[in-house]
Amino acid sequence: MLGGWALASLVLLVAGWSAIMARALPDADDSMRLLEVRDWLAGQSWFDVAQHRLNGGNFPMHWSRLVDVPLAAMIVGLRPVLGAALAEHVAVVVVPLLTLLAALALIASLARRLGGDALVIPAMLMAGLTIPLTFQLSPLRIDHHGWQIVFALLAARALIARPGVQSGLLTGAALATLLTISLEGLPIAAALCGVAALAWVVQPQRGAMLRTLMLTLAGGATLLQAATRGPGFWQPACDALAPAWLAVLGVAAAGVVVAVAVARFGLIARLVALGIAGLAAGATVLTLAPGCLAGPFATLPPLVYQVWYLSVLEGRPAWEQEPVWAAATLALPLAGLIGAALGWRSATGDARQRWAMFALLLLAATLIAVAVSRAGATANALAAPAAAVWLARLLAKARSLSRPVPRVVATLATLALAAPGTLAATALHAVPRGAAPKTQLSHRPSCTSTGDMRVLGTLPPGIVFAPIDLTPALLLDTPHRAVAGGYHRNAAAMARVITGFLAPPGQAQAAILATRSDYLAVCPGMQEMIAYRDRAPDGLWARLERGERFAWLRPVPVRGPALVWRVIHPLREGGSAR
């Protein structure tokens, strides 16, 4: 297993070497995560995860400190030896690789539990070749998605362990941690609990495991809420664990305890008891937090919803993705479902029950991935041990050929099938399609990465009116403050930024001046700026890109492709506006 991890790590390091050397974090959330760790180590409270360099200091966040701990621990440990900057650089490379190690170890353990040692190597091979999974576990990818995958795998492994109090404790603790890290894990957590409950219906001797799971989940989530939120424990929220969600978990746990107590009355009684527990949990949500049923994005202003939310494709369903990406995401889970059916069919006794549970869980994970694209990484991780069934069988048949040349050819062809997502995406990409409408690129030299905004660090510190997607990297790499990043709790600040770039110059000026910004800075050619220009051809950014000038924006020369203007405030600087 360690050899497989070392090989996968080497491949990821080589593939991402240029980005690693430049410390070009792959996503705005990764920049914000490192910034959050840096602020915590600089003295910001453990309980305070707000970003105080945005929106005049009022920019609450819903993130969890748990993900900050491994990064902070490595940075603190390495700082005396490497210095602060290099310690950060090493941490953002090493921590994701350690997350990869944990994920691969759990995938190997799942494969061994389901089908013995013969499945371990094929499962790790398939996991290492699936792009949606390896992207979330690559160097520099330090946001919470990798840890979500690890704790979902841990819960799945405990679910198919020998049923008892110990497996219930481990499953419940893993799910409590998963939900504390992000409430995005709620669907897969519900699926795991549902599979455990159905297994108990069929096998009432699993009652101790189910009861322990639910009590540990409810209790562990409450303890972690207290440990990570502190004074904010009672603050209501739809996008993170909060009192209403904890109450739902508590009611569900109490309902399961009662259900287990009536197990002796037969299968129908168990089903009815579980149904009552589910209805009670649902009624708790309706009573305490009915607005949460619409999701955390339901209250976004129309402008923010249309311009920002609908462009965040990772939160959208599979049918709204590019077909190539949808194929890459769903091919391995579908192959895993076939493998799980084969494994169930050929197994007997307890092994067959494990395969049935795992197949149900994988089906749920696949459906979740269809509904929300970012869940595809977890579905792929869970699919690898199941898909390994047919890969192992094909490899065995290839190796059984007596003649050397056919054996080698068959083996290589079978190994190519270890990456069904890549094969499906490649095949789909090769299918001729009508020409897609071309989006004209920027008229200005284009930025190649958010790192092009680092030149702003040479300017006197101030407030920068910058695109939403660029702001986290700007805060990370410069001493400036800014207006908004892409985080839904701060919809009003996002609306101001979007308005500033889309509105006609007069309205844009009012929006920008209201933020007290000192600079306006953009990266031409980046997708957000192209979207603004295409959406509003007469808006401020489209006109600036065409070369128009306005008296209230004074160009500031900087190196590279980034464009910067000094914002002239008439009352502050005696300027005039056009």
Image (cartoon, helix red, strand yellow):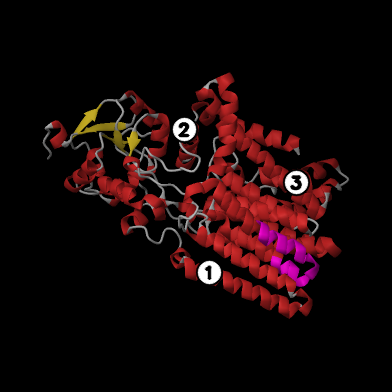
Residue 43's disc is: 2
Tell me if residue 43 can be seen: yes
Q: What span is in magenta?
A: 197-216
Q: Earlier in the sequence, mark 2 or mark 1?
A: 2
Majority secondary structure of magenta residues? helix
Picture coordinates of residue 184, whole percent (x, y): 54, 55
Residue type, label 2: Gly
- Residue at image coords 12%, 39%: 577
Residue type, label 1: Thr
Secondary-structure class at tag 1: helix
Mark 3 vs mark 2, CA separation in Å: 40 Å
Q: Earlier in the sequence, mark 3 or mark 2?
A: 2
- Can you identify the residue that label 1 sits on? 284
How packed is label 3: few (under 14 Cα within 10 Å), some, or many (20 or more)? many
Residue 55's disc is: none
- Residue at image coords 11%, 36%: 576
Residue 56 occupies quadrant: top left
Secondary-structure class at tag 3: helix
Q: In the rendered view, does 60 fall on the left or right side of 367?
A: left
- Can you identify the residue that label 3 sits on? 108
